[in-house]
Amino acid sequence: MLQTIKKLYINEQFNPKILSLLISPSYLQRKFLYNEITPFLSLLNGKLLDIGCGTKPYKNILKVNEYIGLEINKNNPYADIYYDGKEIPLENETFDSILSSEVFEHVFNPNEFLQEANRVLKQDGLVLITVPFVWDEHEQPFDYARYTSFGLEHILNKNGFKIIKSKKIGNGSEVIFQMLNSYFHKITLSKKVYVNFLKTFFLIAPTNIIGLIFSKLLPRNNDLYLGNIVLAKKINTISKGK
């Protein structure tokens, strides 16, 4: 029973449905991320490395020959391989595809990170990165950066990649409602269960529902959005430290 509840909770974190709509302060961001990343995932193939795999939320919808999860946190039971955050302990040009979702903002050495990704990826291999743009500080103190679409293109080009497809997620009124929920959640967080229940019932759930409705009615704004999804191809081999 407990394992079933745990599995449901993990699934709802990354593929939010009705339960998350009613209780999760991150519902809007995760809903739009899941919806938009799914078509990108179908483009990945062959042998895949998931850098910062977490609980491997996308493993079951990927159609790849081999899936390897990499983590810096050695307490993560889902990972297949661990690394020190600097050097990936794998051979050159081992993978056809790389996935790194909601990880890049936690990387303090982004050039070194991308050079390592470049090294273990085959020529013309694909890398899929998602990263927040408008979002509050999270997983403190390991939250280091926010990237515009232009910043991502610049740093990827610098490290041997060319963007072939990109998408801005949450580029509508949902960005406002998501920030409201993040604000409500943090200022009302309590150790008292009944306080959290009241917060969820009167603040979180209504804001999610209204935000979802308004996202269908109001126009998009590509200058204000929750995050970026970028699919890039390795076009050059970059020596580390360049």
Image (cartoon, rainbow, N blue to C red):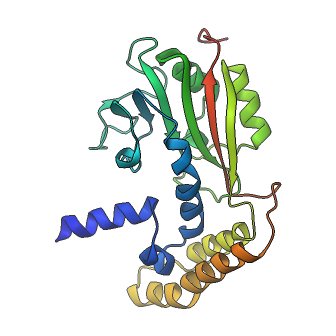
Residue 17 in the image: state x and y as whole percent. Answer: 45, 71
**Front residue of 111 and 22:** 22
Q: What is the number of callouts on the image?
A: 0
Residue 101 in the image: state x and y as whole percent. Answer: 52, 44
Find the residue positioned furthest to the left. Answer: 1
Residue 124 in the image: state x and y as whole percent. Answer: 57, 18
Can the viewer see residue 26? yes
Vertical position of residue 239 compared to residue 69: above or below: above
Res. 239 image quadrant: top right
Can the viewer see residue 141? no
**Front residue of 216 and 132:** 216
Res. 155 image quadrant: top right
The quadrant of the rendering that contains the N terminus is bottom left
Vertical position of residue 58 compared to residue 10: above or below: above
The quadrant of the rendering that contains the C terminus is top right
Vertical position of residue 125 compared to residue 1: above or below: above
Vertical position of residue 65 compared to residue 219: above or below: above
Task: Tell me the residue at 69%/70% (across/down).
Answer: 174
Task: Tell me the residue at 62%/56% (across/down).
Answer: 137
Residue 184 lies left or right of residue 90; in this view the side is right
Residue 241 lies left or right of residue 85; in this view the side is right
Task: Tell me the residue at 61%/25% (across/down).
Answer: 233
Residue 210 lies left or right of residue 127; in this view the side is right
Task: Tell me the residue at 46%/20% (across/down).
Answer: 87
Residue 223 in the image: state x and y as whole percent. Answer: 83, 54
Res. 216 image quadrant: bottom right
Residue 211 lies left or right of residue 200; in this view the side is right
